[in-house]
């Protein structure tokens, strides 16, 4: 597939490799093991949005300007999500996982690749309704500082609320979704108490190490952008970060099966992609 019409594919591929290597050497952000097809699509999109005729022109910009690199990062990390995305997943967390998590005197939950925070607030609401939030520490991590700041702000476009509310109800929500936010100036500002137990932090699944001993890790729709080598690295981090018999939640198209650590996990809720450490 030619990613940019009129741009020789061979040149595009070569300049892509140089761009990704340059980003790693300059900024220590490692995209070298991201899925090539997805990465090419995003770089091609970034070129059009940032008005660069070639990948080399894009590279020249980002290597000489941290601000331009941050602009490019918005395209490379795909900060797109929704609250209670895949409601069946959250329903399974509520009905199958919470009864087990409730047996712990305190909880640590890691949301890896939290993007702009939609999943963070979803889990915080769920834990609040199940009486667990006050004894839970939630670590929400991402490599994109802009996304992390948006997550911490907890402000979402009002036009997304109809979808968020439908997802919340399908996920077994116990209250009125509007109880959790205040609408103002075209935005929904979520209750600050929901993030009182949340620590937002920079963490890369490509370069950083084990995060913390946790009972539950939720990392959804992130690994699909990695190649097999990087997926295995991330799964190794999850295995080593989970406590004995801890849980791992993945996206609807992701699985720990066939990975290098598959023997360390068993299926807990197969349809909802929740696995348990053996």
Image (cartoon, rainbow, N blue to C red):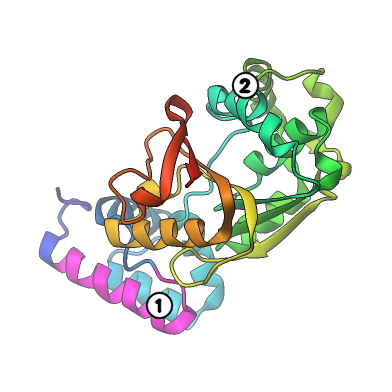
Magenta-highlighted stretch: main secondary structure?
Answer: helix
- Residue 252 as seen in the image, left or right of residue 127: left
For mark 2, does the 10 Å Cα neighbourhood hold few (<14), some (14 to 19), or many (20 or more) residues?
Answer: many
The residue at the point 38 percent across, 40 percent down is 254
In the rendered image, residue 113, in percent from the top left (x then y), is placed at 54, 53
- Residue 134 as seen in the image, left or right of residue 42: right
The residue at the point 42 percent across, 32 percent down is 252
263 and 252: which one is in front? 263
* Residue 274 appears anywhere in the view: yes
Q: Do the residues labelled 1 and 2 touch (CB within 8 Å)?
A: no
In the rendered image, residue 20, in percent from the top left (x then y), is placed at 33, 71
The total number of labels drawn is: 2
For mark 1, does the 10 Å Cα neighbourhood hold few (<14), some (14 to 19), or many (20 or more) residues?
Answer: some
Residue 12, magenta (yes or no): yes
The residue indicated by pointer 1 is 24
Q: Which of marks 1 and 2 is in front?
A: 2
| 237 over 69 or under it: above or below | above
Which mark is drawn over residue 201?
A: none
The residue at the point 46 percent across, 63 percent down is 72
In the rendered image, residue 173, in percent from the top left (x then y), is placed at 73, 20
Q: Quadrant of residue 24?
A: bottom left
Q: Could you say whether the residue bearing mark 1 is in a helix, strand or loop? A: helix
Which mark is drawn over residue 167?
A: 2
In the rendered image, residue 231, in percent from the top left (x then y), is placed at 36, 56
Q: Could you say whether the residue bearing mark 2 is in a helix, strand or loop? A: helix
Q: Which of marks 1 and 2 is nearer the N terminus?
A: 1
Where are the magenta residues, as a range? 11-30
* Residue 8 appears anywhere in the view: no
Compute the Cα span from label 1 to label 2: 38 Å
243 and 253: which one is in front? 243
Residue 246, magenta (yes or no): no
| 81 over 95 or under it: above or below | below
């Amino acid at each position: 597939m030619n990613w940019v019409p009129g741009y020789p594919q061979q040149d595009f591929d070569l300049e892509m490799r140089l761009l990704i290597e340059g980003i790693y050497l300059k900024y220590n952000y490692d995209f070298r093991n991201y899925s090539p097809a997805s990465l090419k699509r995003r770089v091609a999109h970034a070129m059009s949005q940032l008005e660069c005729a070639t990948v080399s022109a894009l590279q020249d910009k980002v290597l000489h300007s941290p601000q331009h690199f941050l602009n490019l990062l918005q395209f490379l990390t795909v900060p797109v999500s929704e609250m209670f995305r895949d409601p069946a997943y959250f329903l399974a967390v509520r009905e199958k996982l919470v009864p087990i998590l409730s047996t712990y005197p305190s909880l640590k939950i890691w949301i890896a690749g939290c993007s702009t925070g939609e999943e963070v607030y979803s889990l915080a609401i769920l834990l609040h309704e199940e009486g667990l939030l006050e004894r839970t520490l939630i670590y929400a991590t991402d490599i994109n500082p802009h996304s992390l700041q948006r997550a911490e702000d907890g402000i979402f476009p009002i036009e997304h609320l109809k979808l968020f509310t439908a997802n919340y109800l399908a996920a077994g929500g116990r209250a009125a979704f509007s109880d959790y936010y205040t609408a103002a100036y075209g935005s929904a500002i979520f209750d600050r108490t929901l993030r009182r137990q949340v620590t937002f932090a920079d963490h890369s699944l490509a370069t950083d190490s084990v995060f913390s001993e946790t009972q539950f890790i939720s990392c959804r729709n992130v690994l699909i952008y990695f190649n097999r080598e990087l997926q295995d690295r991330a799964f190794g981090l999850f295995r080593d970060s989970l406590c004995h018999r801890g849980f791992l939640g993945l996206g609807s198209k992701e699985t720990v099966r066939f990975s290098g650590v598959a023997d360390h996990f068993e299926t807990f809720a197969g349809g909802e992609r929740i696995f348990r450490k053996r």
